[in-house]
Amino acid sequence: MGMQIGSGGASADPEVMIEMNMTPLIDVMLVLIIMLIITIPIQNHAINLNMPTGTPPQQLKEPVVVNIDVDFDGTVLWDGVAVNQNELEVKLQAVATSPDQPEVHLRPVAVVPYKSVAAVMAAAQRLGVTKIGMVGNEQFLK
């Protein structure tokens, strides 16, 4: 049982490898991640809607419908007649102040710029029109 001293000979003793065992560290990190995932509360993105209850009453008469078309160049048509922004606002004000508001159907062409449609919708909202809807949305599905 002698030891060889020197650098030239082959040693029978294997070299000691000094490296850290990563398995326990990885196990602890996985447990911490699982605990973190379990303890995070579930995010519920809810929007409160006031939905009507029961059945709606039968309408005695058909509602009056106003058609507003927005053409490809931004031209606004009120029941087929071209109107400018001032005339549109006067007509929308008349609709908003009537005791039984007519339904306003907004029908934009598929290639109209968004700002033209948004201007009509903003004017209607600002003046107090409550019965407004987009008609012909199936053209935008393509």
Image (cartoon, rainbow, N blue to C red):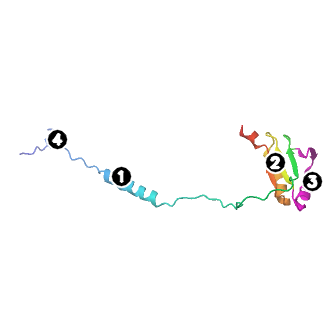
Check disc 3 and report the residue beneath it: 86
Specify the segment rendered in magenta: 75-101
Q: Quadrant of the C terminus?
A: top right
In the picture, measured across the screen, residue 100 lies left or right of residue 35, that is right
Check disc 2 and report the residue beneath it: 117
Image spot of residue 85 (x, y percent) = 90, 51
SS at mark 1 in the image? helix
Q: Nearer the viewer, mark 1 or mark 4?
A: 1
SS at mark 3 in the image? helix
Q: Nearer the viewer, mark 2 or mark 4?
A: 2
Give whichever of 122, 8 is nearer the camera.
122
- Spatial CA distance of label 2 from label 1 is 57 Å
Q: Amino acid at mark 4?
A: Ser
Q: Amino acid at mark 1?
A: Ile
Does the segment drawn in magenta span residue 76?
yes
Image spot of residue 127 (x, y percent) = 86, 60
Earlier-in-chain disc, 2 versus 3: 3
Q: Nearer the viewer, mark 4 or mark 3?
A: 3
